[in-house]
Image (cartoon, grey):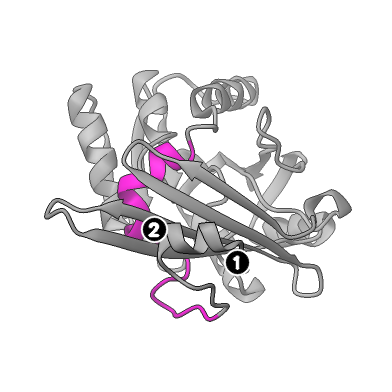
């Protein structure tokens, strides 16, 4: 990092990551929608629904949006008449989703939930997990557990759609930096890839002025685990699914969501 960037943000680089900073979206919730404004969620939802409808999803069906975050996929689903339940670990992200639903007078059920300990008490015609919700599960045993848990949320014959970082050559890059000016903040990203561990890391630091006029900096480090396609498919099938559409590598225009049917 050059000296100007260090001075602007008021911090020195460190590779140490504490548990509180790792994949904790509460820390950046207020900035999240702006940070991912490049992502065409409405388009992704439209394309995904077209595929799901071709595979038998009826209009108005019950859908579980797993790891729904701030509701960027939840709200478009509800607008189209689906009965949507969104779950997420982050209370701050869920509060943003509630505000969006209330602003549009949409009936959306939103609750705290962890993919490793789901206890929703109802079943759904479809479950979706969009934009890396499963990628933050770093241990393969836990990922397998999440697939089993999501299978239990589905009616017989229900559909499961998700995207996933795939361990393919195009996934990996050289270390990169990106600096972005937000409406009321500055953000600096550092990206790195560990081919041996199959881990992608995004180190995000945001500097802003809080309501008292004080300068603040927050840091959140995202780590995401890539999985070979063949191994991923075997894990999902082991959890009780049959593959209908193969997962593909994520791109901005197409998140490459795989679709499976509960059997």
Name the foreground residue: 162 vs 40: 40
Q: Name the spot of residue 182 as percent of width and height, x first.
A: 40, 39
Label 2 vs label 1: CA separation? 19 Å
Q: Quadrant of residue 256?
A: top right
Q: Residue at x 20, y 53 (%)?
A: 210
Judging by the rendered image, the residue that carries numbered circle 2 is 25
Magenta residue span: 16-36
- The question of residue 24 being in magenta is answered with yes
Name the foreground residue: 249 vs 6: 6
Label 1 neighbour load within 10 Å: few <14, some 14-19, many 20+: many
Q: Name the spot of residue 203 as percent of width and height, x first.
A: 54, 62
Label 2 neighbour load within 10 Å: few <14, some 14-19, many 20+: many
Name the foreground residue: 167 vs 210: 210
Name the foreground residue: 244 vs 206: 206
Label whose residue precedes the other's in the sequence (2 or 1): 2
- The question of residue 119 being in magenta is answered with no
**For numbered disc 1, what is the local secondary structure?**
helix
Mark 2 or mark 1, whichever is nearer to me: 2
Q: Quadrant of residue 88?
A: bottom left
Would you say 22 lies left or right of 211 here? Answer: right
Q: Residue at x 80, y 62 (%)?
A: 231
Judging by the rendered image, the residue that carries numbered circle 1 is 143
Image quadrant for the N terminus? bottom right
| Mark carried by residue 75 | none
């Amino acid at each position: 990092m050059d000296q100007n960037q260090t001075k602007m943000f008021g911090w020195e680089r460190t590779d140490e990551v504490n548990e509180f900073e790792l994949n904790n979206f509460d820390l950046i919730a207020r900035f999240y929608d702006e940070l991912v404004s490049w992502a065409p969620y409405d388009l992704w939802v439209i394309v995904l629904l077209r595929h799901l409808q071709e595979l038998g999803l009826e209009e108005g069906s019950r859908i579980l949006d797993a790891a729904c975050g701030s509701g960027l996929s939840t709200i478009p689903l509800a607008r189209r008449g689906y009965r949507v339940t969104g779950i997420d670990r982050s209370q701050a992200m869920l509060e943003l989703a509630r505000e969006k639903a209330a602003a549009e007078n949409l009936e959306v059920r939103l609750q705290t939930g962890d993919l490793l300990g789901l206890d929703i008490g109802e079943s759904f015609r479809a479950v979706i997990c969009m934009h890396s919700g499963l990628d933050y599960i770093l241990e393969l045993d836990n990922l397998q557990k999440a697939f089993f848990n999501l299978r239990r949320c589905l009616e017989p014959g229900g559909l499961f759609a998700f995207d996933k970082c795939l361990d393919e050559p195009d996934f990996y890059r050289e270390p990169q930096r990106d600096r972005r000016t937000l409406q009321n903040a500055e953000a600096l990203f550092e990206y790195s890839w560990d081919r041996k561990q199959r881990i992608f890391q995004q180190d995000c630091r945001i500097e802003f002025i809080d309501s008292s006029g004080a300068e603040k900096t927050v840091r959140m480090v995202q780590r995401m685990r890539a999985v070979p396609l063949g191994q991923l498919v075997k894990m999902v099938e082991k959890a009780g699914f049959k593959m209908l559409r193969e997962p593909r590598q994520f791109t901005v225009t197409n998140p490459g969501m795989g679709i499976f049917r509960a059997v």
